[in-house]
């Protein structure tokens, strides 16, 4: 089985962070979101992975992931010149995928459940069906398996209708009257018949080849589409608040690791990771939290659910429930909370008179000032 990770989105909902960086590389607990998906695939035994990238962010993602050896996998890069839909990603990846089964994974998704069981159950279902009907038609074997999650607002998602035989009978995109509360999570398993489907469908009204249309084509062609309901949490990290929530959930799994330097006036409380090369001076870190390598924390309090990336400088400040990207400098800020701070950002509180707030802010920012 091969893997296909989609990392070509523009990340407009995370602007201005994504004006200068790929959304799939925004860190959760100091690890890029994309890395979690690659690691999940590697753990499931999938070692050949294709990653779909866009012209604007492809080079940055290539540099971060490398050849895949750090994850124990090999990477094939698949450029997508325009964002023409998830089914279009399958279409352009057909040469890489060949006739093999594959798992397709949205690169900005985060979920508690791993892939191993999901993959094994699909393969076992196909194997069991084949064993029961050795001389029967291949259509008896499941051609796809989708992961679903129960949601409170199904009208905002692609929704699956499940038949009496517990198989998927219809997929509806953002229905006014949802047939169920089961939303598509963004993780799919396919056999090679999906290539016929993506070649047969037409673009949707928004000009994209929709994967829901391709799966519906399989159903209408008499092929079986199975499903599983997600066990645990699932978060689309495409907006700030869900990303911070995801950061909290991952930080809750931390164990105490102190590889950095802590002076006698500093304290570490709870589940905290202090990476090698980080330094605490007259500061408190209360977990769950992570302090990245090379960061300097002086005269500050880092509260729960904070991720401070590498080479940051935090001085005379108080931070909680925030994600601070690499090389940021935060000085004399009484309290920074519920925030996502970009790379190489400088946030300072001036002491000179007349005191004033001075900012240079990009598009799509939300700022609250006391």
Image (tube, rainbow, N blue to C red):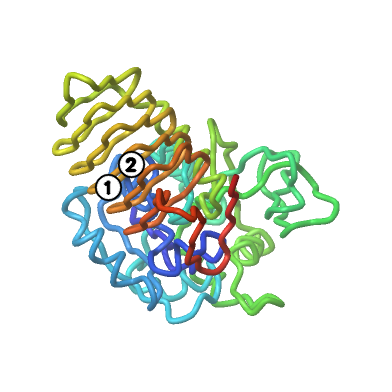
Q: Position of residue 139 (x, y in %)?
A: 56, 56
Locate the C terminus by quadrant: top right
Q: Residue at x 75, y 39 (%)?
A: 164
User: How far apart are the alpha carbons under marks 2 and 1?
Assistant: 7 Å
Q: Position of residue 39 (x, y in %)?
A: 31, 44
Q: Which residue is mark 1?
A: 312
Left or right of 48 in this view: 52: right
- Is 303 situated above or below 322? above
Question: Marks 1 and 2: in contact by CB < 8 Å?
Answer: yes
Task: Say which residue label 2 marks.
Answer: 308
Q: How many residues crowd around disc 1 within 10 Å: few (fewer than 14), some, or many (20 or more)? A: many
Report the residue at 48% width, 36% height from top.
321
Under tag 2, what secondary structure? strand
Q: Is residue 193 visible?
A: no
The residue located at (48%, 49%) in the rendering is 109
* Dot 2 alpha-carbon crowd within 10 angstroms: few under 14, some 14 to 19, many 20 or more: many
Q: Please give the count of numbered marks on the rendered protein.
A: 2
In this view, the residue in front, 57 or 188, is: 57
Judged from the image, the secondary structure of the residue bearing numbered disc 1 is loop
């Amino acid at each position: 089985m091969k893997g296909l990770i989609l990392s070509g989105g523009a990340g407009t909902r995370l602007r201005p962070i994504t004006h200068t960086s790929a959304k799939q590389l925004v860190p959760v607990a100091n690890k890029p979101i994309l890395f979690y998906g690659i690691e999940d695939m590697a753990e499931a035994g999938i070692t050949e992975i294709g990653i779909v990238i866009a012209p604007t962010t492809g080079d940055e993602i290539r540099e971060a992931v490398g050849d895949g050896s750090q994850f124990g996998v090999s990477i094939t890069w698949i450029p997508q010149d325009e964002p023409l839909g998830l089914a279009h990603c399958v279409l352009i990846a057909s040469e890489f995928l060949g006739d093999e089964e594959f798992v397709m994974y949205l690169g900005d998704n985060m979920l508690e459940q791993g892939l191993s069981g999901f993959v094994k159950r699909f393969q076992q279902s196909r194997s069991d069906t084949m064993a029961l009907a050795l001389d029967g038609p291949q259509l008896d074997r499941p051609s796809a398996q989708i992961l679903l999650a129960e949601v409170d607002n199904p009208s905002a998602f692609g929704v699956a209708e499940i038949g009496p035989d517990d198989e998927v009978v219809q997929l509806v995109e953002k229905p006014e009257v949802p047939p169920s509360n089961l939303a598509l999570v963004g993780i799919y398993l396919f056999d090679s018949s999906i290539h016929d489907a993506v070649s047969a469908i037409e673009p949707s009204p928004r000009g994209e080849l929709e994967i829901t249309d391709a799966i519906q084509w399989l159903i209408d062609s008499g092929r079986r589409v199975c499903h599983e309901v997600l066990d645990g949490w699932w978060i689309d990290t495409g907006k700030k608040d869900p990303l911070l929530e995801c950061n909290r959930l991952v930080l809750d799994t931390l164990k105490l690791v102190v590889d950095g330097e802590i002076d006698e006036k500093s304290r570490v409380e709870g589940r905290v990771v202090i990476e090698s090369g980080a330094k605490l001076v007259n500061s408190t870190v209360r977990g769950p939290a992570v302090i990245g390598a090379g960061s300097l924390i002086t005269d500050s309090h880092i509260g729960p659910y904070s991720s401070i990336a590498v080479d940051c400088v935090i001085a005379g400040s108080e931070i909680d429930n925030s994600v601070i990207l690499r090389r940021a400098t935060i000085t004399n800020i009484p309290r920074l909370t519920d925030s996502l701070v970009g790379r190489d950002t400088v946030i300072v509180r001036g002491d000179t008179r007349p005191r004033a707030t001075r900012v240079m802010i990009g598009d799509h920012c939300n700022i609250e000032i006391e």
